[in-house]
Image: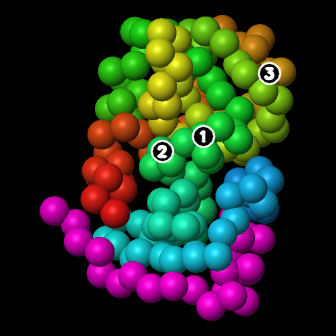
Amino acid sequence: MTETLKRHFLREKEAKQLLAQIQQQAQIDIKSLVGERVEFAETEIATIYLINNKPLFAKKDAVIFPTLGFDDVTKLLPKIVVNMGAVPHVCNGADIMAPGVVEVNGTFGKDSFVIIVDEQHKKPLATGTALYDSKEIKTLKHGKIVKNMHHVGDKLWYLLRKL
């Protein structure tokens, strides 16, 4: 099992720089999430950023993305609702395909972060990067529309539960 290699608090200046970078890459307003304590945990899988002791973001391959570790972030992002037949595939790391999409909630551009939820319970299944903007996704009937970055059941998801 992957262990945390290094965990410490960031200085105020470092925390402000990090939050600005997160806001730019995630394209969401995170001012409501900002707290006094910004910490990071370096692991073999990814670097995890904790704000007020909640694992909100992770960094892997120089990309900072929202995690499924805390509901406040998932509420801020646009959502793509998939049918129940797509759920096992998404939870195994598959990218989101147009035929499985039931609904698109929110407006977003290409390369924006989105949350993938199931149609029955509206539970977050994955975070991903949109390959098209929201208007295009609503019209597509086939092909890949979202790159799956982090999903329920992946190594990062299990690690977040331990932090």
Could you say which quadrant of the image residue 107 lies in? Answer: top right
User: Gap in Å between the C-alphas at discs 2 and 1?
Assistant: 7 Å
Q: Position of residue 45 (x, y in %)?
A: 35, 65
Q: Are marks 2 and 1 in contact (CB under 8 Å)?
A: yes
Determine which residue is flagged by label 1. Answer: 74
Looking at the picture, does residue 161 appear above or below residue 122?
Answer: below
Q: Residue at the spot x=45%, y=85% of the render?
A: 8
> Is residue 80 among the parts visible in the rendering?
yes
Query: Closer to the observer: label 3 or label 2?
Result: 2
| Magenta-span inclusion, residue 110 | no
> Is residue 25 among the parts visible in the rendering?
no
Observer-nearest of 95 and 114 = 114
Q: Specify the amino acid type for callout 1.
A: Thr
Q: Which portion, as a residue range, is magenta?
A: 1-22
Looking at the picture, does residue 32 appear above or below residue 118?
Answer: below
**In the drawing, what numbered circle is on residue 40?**
none
Q: Quadrant of the N terminus?
A: bottom left
| Magenta-span inclusion, residue 14 | yes
Nearest to N terminus: mark 1 or mark 3? 1
User: Gap in Å between the C-alphas at discs 3 and 2?
Assistant: 25 Å
Observer-nearest of 19 and 52 = 52
Q: Residue at the spot x=41%, y=75% of the render?
A: 41
Q: Position of residue 80 (x, y in %)?
A: 63, 24
Q: Specify the amino acid type for callout 2.
A: Leu
Left or right: 111 as drawn, with respect to 151: right
Looking at the picture, does residue 11 appear above or below residue 88?
Answer: below
Local secondary structure at mark 2: loop
Crowd around label 1: few <14 · some 14–19 · many ≥20 (10 Å): many
**In the drawing, what numbered circle is on residue 136?**
3
User: Gap in Å between the C-alphas at discs 1 and 3?
Assistant: 22 Å
Determine which residue is flagged by label 2. Answer: 68
Q: Specify the amino acid type for callout 3.
A: Glu
